[in-house]
Amino acid sequence: MLSALFQVLLLCTPFLISLPLSSAETCTIDYSGDASIDDAPAVLDAFDRCGNGGVIVFQNSTYHINSVMNTTGLQDVVVQLQGTLLWSDDIDYWLDNSMPIGYQNQSTVWFFGGDNVTFEGYGCGTFDGNGQAWYNFVNGQSNYPNRPHAFTPWYLTNSEVTGLRFVQSQMWTMSILHSDSVLFQNIYVNSTSSNRTPARNTDGADTIFSSNIHFDQWTVANGDDSISMKANSTDITITNCTFYRGLGIAIGSIGQYKDVYETIENIYAENIQYYDTRHAAYFKTWTGDQVGYPPNGGGGGLGGTYTLPMQGLWGETQLMIHIIRLEYDFHEPAWLIHGRICFYQSMYNILWHSGELLRLEIPDSRYYVV
């Protein structure tokens, strides 16, 4: 089923796209057609010239991206991606030059931000991160320093990102930070390994310090969280999505930074299909005592998680709800979490304390909770 899905999604016909006539200035980006020539400078030049009220067009070809890009501060812009952005596999360059995002040791190859921005991929515009080179290089090591994310919406507001394809992302596909009121719709993610090295840390999307984010019509096949809400994520909606192989919807991890208050609130999910995922939804918390430092250690954080309605979740998943406490059993838990989770109109009332389930009230339902 999965391979057939991939074949269908590859049947794109970007040559049928007719670009709308507009009085706005249009910057059509030239491409080199040569992997040894970096197309990133031409991309940055187009965003500089047309990043305020303009239209930026990637043609139906392959752009070789060999250096980092920062295109923030955009205003009233339409970006049209008809072809493929192919990142180089020069791992040494990316480790030396990827840009920190200010959370854990995470970094990115592209900061993208502004207000009233539309990024259109038409179902064919593709980001190719050359991820297999990264999966082989880290060989399963978690959160390898300076291993970059594919795309980072950064202070993006009142905007839409639609119809994009992400294949073989370097690490997380999207890290969404300091953003508000953004629709991410009709997004396809396939970050899976072609050999026995795992595609670890290949989250489909992670929200951090962001609000009013809507994920709609996502297809994600990967080796980690399908979509994850991290520190200070509020009013996040996930609808009409299909997840393959990964870990499902993740709340957290949270409570990782000592004495830092974080919250995750108002997470709503509806009509989600799962195929061979580990969880439908799961919760990752750190304990009350700090043990080590982020990204792979931590704890002692403050805060809570509230209001988590989910309904219409179905498919092939090993665990419906799973609560994980990250760290050793002898440490006191840090987080007090209250929530309500709904499956097929049956409401679960839950109260747990950093991974320790204190109370669970279950009406008649077809699902179980662990």
Image (cartoon, rainbow, N blue to C red):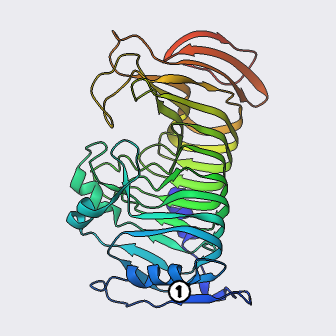
In this picture, residue 234 sits left or right of residue 152 = right
The percent position of residue 60, horizontal first and vertical second, equals 53, 86
Task: Say which of 194 and 80 sits in front.
Answer: 80
Q: What element carries label 1?
A: loop
Instruction: Point out the image quarter for the C terminus.
Output: top right
Q: In which quarter of the image is residue 158?
A: bottom right
The percent position of residue 160, horizontal first and vertical second, equals 67, 63
- The residue that disc 1 covers is 60
In this picture, residue 319 sits left or right of residue 286 = right
In this picture, residue 126 sits left or right of residue 75 = left
Q: Quadrant of residue 359?
A: top right
Task: Say which of 100 and 184 sits in front.
Answer: 100
In this picture, residue 120 sits left or right of residue 293 = right
Badge 1 density bin: few <14, some 14–19, many ≥20, Cα 10 Å: some
What residue is at 67 percent from the left and 37 percent from the top?
A: 313
Going by the picture, which residue comes out furthest to the right? 345
Quick check: 286 above or below 213?
A: above
What residue is at 42 percent from the left and 52 percent from the top?
A: 172
The amino acid type of the residue labelled 1 equals Asn
